[in-house]
Structures are given as C-alpha cells and as structure tokens.
Image: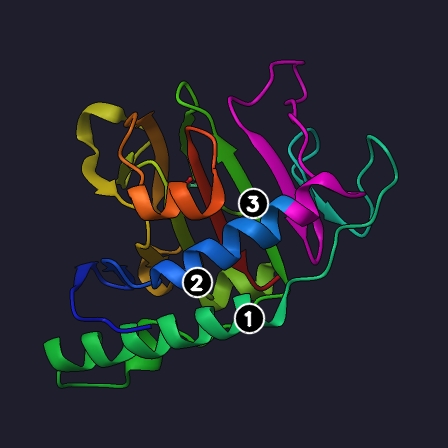
Amino acid sequence: VEAQNGFVLRSGMVLLKGCISLDDQVKIVKVCRGLGLGPGGFYQPGYRDGAKLHLKMMCLGKNWDPETSEYGDQRPIDGTRPPIIPLEFNQLVEKAIKNSHSLIGNECKAGSVEDILPWMIPNLCIVNFYSSSGRLGLHQDRDESPESLDKGLPVVSFSIGDAAEFLYGDERDVEKAEKIVLESGDILIFGGKSRHVFHGVTAIKPNTAPKALQEATNLRPGRLNLTFREY
Ligand code: AKG
C-alpha cells in the first residue's frame, strides 16, 4: 500500500487514492466471491420496515443485522456464522492506517497523530456489493460498541470495481453534504472527530472499473465495498 496520493478531508477523515494494488484488488474480489457463495455469504438484507437495502451484503468476523441494528455471532435470517476476516485483508488495513498517520503527521505538526486517528485492529468487516443501480442513504455508523465509538476507532473502507459517488457531511442532508468519487483501489478512513460523519452512496458510475480488474476477475458490473471496524 503506497500513499502516493492522499488527502485529509477533515479531522480524522482520510482518502488514499489508488492505494490497493491491482493484484490485491484481484485477490480481494476472488476471496470475496469464494466466501460470498458459501455459508454466511451474500444476501439482500432488509430493514425493520421490510424495505430492502439496494445492495447485497455479507459480514465477516461478526454479523451486523440491519433489521435490529445489532451485532451478533450468527445471522438471524439463517443462523449462519460469518466467515473470519482473511489475514491479508487486515494487513492492508494496517498499512492504510499507517499511511494515513504519515499523511496527517505531514499536515499537522502538533500533537499525536493517534489522537487524531486512533489505531484499530478490525474484528469485523461488512462487505457490500452494489449493482449499477445500487445506493445507500446518508447514515452514521454507530452500532459498534460504546467504547469503540467513544474512542473514535476508525472505519476503513475499500472500494473495488465501478466508481461510486460518495457523500459525507455533518447532517443527514444531501444538499449540505460534500461529494467525492471513490474509485477502484481507493481507501477511505473515518475515525476520531469524523467517526460519526453522515455518509452514503448516491450512485454507481457504470463502466468505470479498471479493464485489467474486469479481465482478471470477470467481476460483474458494480462495486464491491469492504468496511472494516473494531467492535
Ligand atoms: C457502510 O457500510 O456503512 C457504508 O456506508 C458503505 C459506504 C460505501 O459503500 O462506500
């Protein structure tokens, strides 16, 4: 993981452009496909009111249930246990946090970078697959443990495949949100003061996945997103 191209978007929120090598992107797609077809694999989750999310989801390490907004060791819909997080994934997360720390350190000389963006060792990962019409409304991630949220332990998000229009801001208001494009290989991190940022995906941009990724994996049109967290 090289941060040739990184941006501090706000305190505790970092975008690392093109941070996941093509080889690693290919590996991630293949591993997720394998796990996604097995027990605890991809399904289309629903909310409490019965509405379906506009994406396919699978959890690793711990199950997150959109119906109850709770974490657990089993998935209520079918009793399966989530697959464990592959070691290589956690190694990429560790490098991404290191890169973010050096980026933050370059920009602000005072204080400890770990106060701005705390360390985190993921024990869960939510894998989302958005088809071309996939999206996800503005929301906060706040179902992790009170200790994790209080400490501002970051969410680390990998984007692979087609690019996404991603919004973030202080309120659940699309008009007031900032807009960025997350492309294949990008890593977005939000922790510290940005841990409760509202965020969502408004659109997937068709035919924007790298050709080489498509050829190596035969990934269907759409976007794979992995968000790592520490419960
Ligand atoms: C989440 O899993 O909470 C997300 O917001 C995913 C965002 C994304 O797909 O980039």
The disc placed on residue 88 is 1
Residue linked to disc 3: 127
Residue linked to disc 2: 24
As measured in the structure, the alpha-carbon distance from the residue carrying label 2 to the one carrying label 1 is 9 Å
- Position of 183 compared to 142: left or right? left
Mark 1: secondary structure:
helix
Looking at the picture, how far across and down is residue 114, in whole percent?
35, 80
| Dot 1 crowding, Cα within 10 Å, few <14, some 14–19, many 20+ | few
**Residue contact at pointers 2 and 3, CB within 8 angstroms:** no
Query: At 27% from the left edge and 45% from the top edge, which residue is drawn?
Result: 183
Looking at the picture, how far across and down is residue 174, in whole percent?
26, 25
As measured in the structure, the alpha-carbon distance from the residue carrying label 1 to the one carrying label 3 is 15 Å
Among numbered discs 1 and 3, the one appearing first in the sequence: 1
Dominant SS in magenta = loop
Query: At 35% from the left edge and 32% from the top edge, which residue is drawn?
Result: 201
Query: At 28% from the left edge and 85% from the top edge, which residue is drawn?
Result: 112
Mark 2: secondary structure:
helix
The quadrant of the picture occupied by the C terminus is: bottom right
The disc placed on residue 210 is none
- Kind of residue sitting beneath label 2: Asp
- Kind of residue sitting beneath label 1: Glu
| Dot 2 crowding, Cα within 10 Å, few <14, some 14–19, many 20+ | some
